[in-house]
Image (spheres, helix red, strand yellow):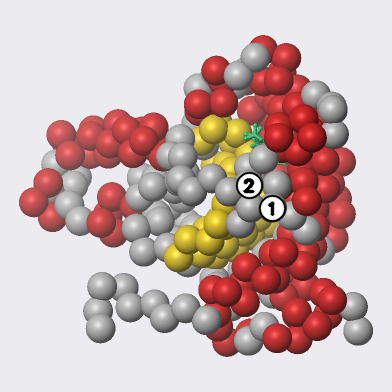
Amino acid sequence: MTRFEKLKSQIDPKKLPNHIAVIMDGNGRWAKKKGAGRLYGHKNGVESVRAIVEASVEIGLKYLTIYAFSTENWSRPEDEVKGLLKLILDSLVNEIDQMSKNNIVVRFIGSNDNLSLEYQKKIQDECKKSWNNTGLNFNIAMNYGGRLELIDAIKEMMPEIISGDINKDNLDEKIFEKYLYTSDIPDPDFMVRTSGEKRLSNFLIWQSAYTELYFTDILWPDFKKEAFLEAILDFQNRNRRFGGV
Ligand code: FPP
């Protein structure tokens, strides 16, 4: 039995998180340790994405969301930004058929601001190929920022408040959530961040109100299937009370 199979056998399918969100951090530091440029780290990070997507399919996870590019990432050096945008699109183009064969539904969530129409269309056209699938829902947060998501939601909702279609006295969490990028995605039960940083960094800030958090020192390009299953086993030992007793 491989170590992966052993870990997999320890997972209780009844206590599997429904939705795992992942902050993939540490690509730059990983590359630096190898004396290479930051993009080399991101390229190797894609291999870890493949690994956790495969593991997610193998264990029957329903939702997986990764933080690929944040609204704050535009402030990185131009070469890195360009490289990341290209890497994300190229990875999607290269992997979509294989993902589709594995019954995966691929969606991008985030803002369109600053992304060219051509880029948006390419992403949309690739993702669409997977939309008849019924297996793992794989969400890629791209040009995503949690605060911007809330502002965007308010902007979308405002005309309906003004027209009276929504009565402001009836506005509640359920109605508000319909205007988020994640309107048809359940809240994550579990969030993993690699590389030793212990922050949310503007990721799914509304949706993670009751999410269990998990931090590991492993740098993202070294985070593979086994580390992912270890994180899930940690989750299964937690006692979730949602503010109750
Ligand atoms: C954080 O590491 C990582 C990112 C900002 C980019 C992650 C993106 C990928 C791995 C590509 C995703 C691809 C697909 C398939 C959609 P960092 O650069 O902040 O590392 P550091 O903190 O060590 O500098």
Q: As rendered, which of 148 and 180 lies closer to the eye?
A: 148
Residue tagged by mark 2? 195
Residue 130: % across, % down? 73, 53
Q: Mark 2: which amino acid?
A: Ser
Q: Tags 1 and 2 in contact by the CB under 8 Å rule?
A: yes
Could you say whether the residue bearing mark 1 is in a helix, strand or loop?
loop
Residue 51: % across, % down? 80, 57
Q: Residue drawn 77% across and 30% down?
A: 32
Residue 143: % across, % down? 55, 31
In which of the image's four quarters is ligand 1 placed? top right
Give the answer, above or below, for where 21 lies relative to 232.
above
Farthest left residue in view: 169
Q: Mark 1: which amino acid?
A: Ile
Residue 23 as seen in the image, left or right of residue 41: left
Mark 1, residues whose alpha carbon is within 10 Å: few (<14), some, or many (≥20)? some
Residue 125: % across, % down? 72, 37
Q: Quadrant of the C terminus?
A: bottom left
Farthest top residue in view: 78
Q: Which mark is residue 218?
A: 1
What separation in Å lies between label 1 and label 2 (alpha carbons)?
5 Å
Q: Residue drawn 56% across and 26% down?
A: 73
Q: Residue drawn 74% across and 59% down?
A: 52
Q: Is residue 22 visible?
A: no
